[in-house]
Amino acid sequence: MRSLLAGQDACVVMPTGGGKSLCYQLPAAMSADKTVIVISPLIALMEDQVAQLAQMEIPAALLNSSIAPAQQQRVIEKARAGGYRLLYLSPERLAREDTVTWLRTVPVNLFAIDEAHCISEWGHEFRPDYRQLSRLRSQFPDRPIAAFTASATRHVRHDIIEQLKLREPHKYIASFHRPNLRYVVRQADAATQLDMLLTALQYYKEGNIIVYAGTINGVESTAALLEAAGISAIPYHGQMDAVERKRNQERWMADEARVIVGTIAFGLGINKANVRAVIHLSLPKSIEQFYQEAGRAGRDGQPADCVLLWLKKDAGLHAYFINQINDPAEKERSWQRYHQIRDFVESDACRHRRVCEHFGEKKKWTSCGACDACGYLPAWLAEYSAAVSKKRGRLLVKSANASPGGPTAQPSVVRAVPSGKADVHPELREFLREWRRETATAQNLAAFIVMHDTTLDDLCRVRPKSMAELRGVLGIGELKAKKYGAQILDALKRFDAGERAKPRAEAKVEPAAETMRLLREGKSLEEIARARGRQFSTIAGTVADLVERGFVEFQDGWVDASRRARIEAACEGRGLGALRPLKEALPLDFTWEEIRLVVAHLRWLREQQPGTVAASGA
């Protein structure tokens, strides 16, 4: 903050939840009549930050394509007059010449580049539009530029500085070690992966859960399976209607649903403190991706599990897609990331240490005590492994390797319940959550913008009786006290008088579960697509995923017998990995949906009968 207030360029690397936004928001609030221009890649993230700033009465705005032209012009005019402390733009918007023209008339304080790793081709989320930001130095030569990211290796950091032409930047590199996170990696197959997921979700009774699936079909089918198992979960992916996708995120943020199943499209900029577990169902493309997504757990500083249940086929699919890259340099970078993540999941070395070393941070310890390689084992995984061992008659859970010269480390079985919650009255917490939901709905805001979970917890501990006591609660400043103080004190009085939260049904995933119901009724895939108003390809992909996991039986009516035989014959020669080689080997009239369904069935057969590639008519 001192560097930015002094007009100095900066390169800032801090972990998820480390306070990057505060680093440029507070200097902006302190600088009257000047505007910090924030470059951010996601509209939803910009909207949330602007709404939060409005709650603190800090003038802020954003410009994007969803805003009416007349409103955009009003924002531009107010920005020219110095009416905003922060103005949020996308890299695409900043690349427009007309934007640069009017921005030159704005009293710009500095430029803050969020998710700055996107500017580097070595970054795991490289976005070509970010390359346009390299022109900022020539377009605004006297304005400071600050780059912020949570996941940049030393190579990427140097590239960021070079691309943005930062001038002798002050560098702030926080530790990449998140000691409250507990890393657990297991290789699974399609059947055991879902069994482990269901076992895990039964254990996490507090907080929220993020489940990452590798594909859109995987998101849909996993959400449907969890719903069928009685676990409330909602999906999130890029092909959903934008309104539905935003609503699902808001429901999860407001605790209307504890579990969200998403692709990598979910989570960037998510500001939720009490995520108790992040569970990956596919192999990430890089250590940076895993670190960033896993880092969305435990932002409140309480223990949280980061579980990676990867499948061997994930590695094969990654390798196939890398081989499709034409640019030699990009292909080489992708192979490097591939080998790094494979080495990470297959290694027996301390995972916290491996993550830190990947980002160029040296740690002296040999054992962290907070990963599976160093002896940590969640209670649910110990229970699952014991059940499997009993069923198969052999031990599957192994002790972690001993440190050199030391004794063998025994698994540390810990129930996945966060510490620090014992003094939080559960009924009062739910009552205050209900007040927060109703307040947020009335103001058309996300619940976390009204009040963070950590503030709710501290309200439960302090239970203030006056405005003076309320101001002593974590997260309650003068503005919050003025805006919500009377309502909070009234809610606490009503609770003390015996009022309780109204029972409410958890959110359901009717759309995903509906596919399974219609299948049970004997509907064809075409009929299901029409009934649900979805593309046939979406329904076929979801059903194929259910087939591969063994939750739905393959039906002969889905693919003509002769065509099925041709697809199986192609699989004999080309295997069951990527679908494109099969598509290229078959006549043009063979559809992706037919191939996907047949391959899913063969993959399921292979799981049941190792060594079997195709079993026509089985």
Image: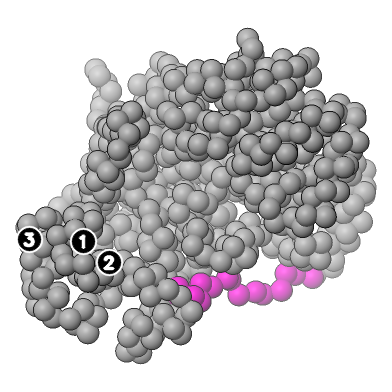
Question: Which image quadrant: the C terminus?
Answer: bottom left
Q: Is residue 510 magenta?
A: yes
Three-letter amino acid code of the residue under disc 3? Glu
Mark 2 = which residue? 592
Mark 1 = which residue? 583
- Residues in magenta? 499-513
At a point 33% along the width and 57% down the height, the residue shown is 196
Three-letter amino acid code of the residue under disc 2? Trp
365 lies above or below 93: above
- Give the Cα distance between marks 2 and 1: 7 Å
Three-letter amino acid code of the residue under disc 1? Lys
What percent of the width, then of the height, locates residue 494? 85, 66
Of tags 2 and 3, which is closer to the observer? 2
At a point 47% along the width and 42% down the height, the residue shown is 294
Q: Looking at this view, is 142 or 531 the one in front?
A: 142
- Residue 109, image quadrant: top right
- Give the Cα distance between marks 1 and 3: 14 Å
Q: Describe residue 8's horizontal placement relative to residue 178 as left or right.
A: right
At a point 83% along the width and 32% down the height, the residue shown is 106
Of the image marks 2 and 3, the number of the one nearer the N terminus: 3
What percent of the width, then of the height, locates residue 147? 62, 26
Tags 2 and 1 in contact by the CB under 8 Å rule? yes
- Secondary structure of the residue carrying numbered label 2: helix
333 lies above or below 429: above
Mark 3 = which residue? 572
Of tags 1 and 3, which is closer to the observer? 1
Q: Describe residue 582's horizontal placement relative to residue 83 as left or right.
A: left
